Amino acid sequence: MNKTQQYNQMREVLNEIKHTSLSGNKEGHFYAYASESENHIRKKFEVWLKLKKAGYKLWCEPIFKTGIRMDILAFKEGIFTNYEILENETLKELEKKTKKYPEINIIPIKTNQEIIDLEMF
């Protein structure tokens, strides 16, 4: 995939994000909410930081026009990936929720899961 195709694919997904001051529509910014547990925020930040250091373009807590919100939306080399942090949520609940997501890769990460490097995924 050439750079123009990558850019067009990126714009296609990003055009589905609501652009408000409350959504994670700003690339490279980390967001956390009072409603999230400390474990959830810590794991989300750990993943976000590893992705940032690896050169990914990142959107944290983007809210899509469908009303759904992802934990971390990452883009690199023409591929979008959604990293979902799970604490109490089951994989079945995540599967139901992700039916409203754009068609992109989804990687669930448990808050108690040790992340050694990104190659784990």
Image: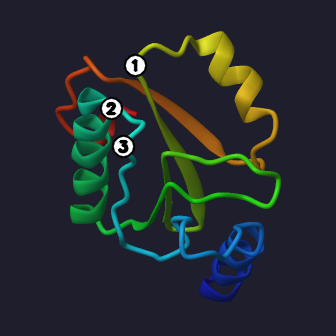
Instruction: Categorize mark 1 by other alpha carbons within 10 Å: few (<14), some (14-19), many (20+).
Output: some
Instruction: Categorize mark 2 by other alpha carbons within 10 Å: few (<14), some (14-19), many (20+).
Output: many
Q: Nearer the viewer, mark 2 or mark 3?
A: 3
Residue 113: x %, y % from top left? 27, 20
Residue under label 1: 87
Q: State which quarter of the image contains the N terminus.
A: bottom right
Residue situated in front as seen by the camera: 73 or 66: 66
Task: Give yes or no for contact between labels 2 and 1 (Cβ–Cβ under 8 Å).
Answer: yes
- Secondary-structure class at tag 3: loop
Residue 110 vertical position relative to residue 13 in the rendered view, above or below: above
Amino acid at pointer 3 = Ala
Work out whether mark 3 precedes mark 1 in sequence or the reverse, and give the earlier one.
3
Residue under label 3: 34
Instruction: Categorize mark 3 by other alpha carbons within 10 Å: few (<14), some (14-19), many (20+).
Output: few
Task: Please indicate whether residue 29 sits to the left or right of residue 3 in the image.
Answer: left
Which residue: 81% across, 33% down?
Answer: 99
Residue situated in front as seen by the camera: 109 or 117: 109
Amino acid at pointer 1 = Glu
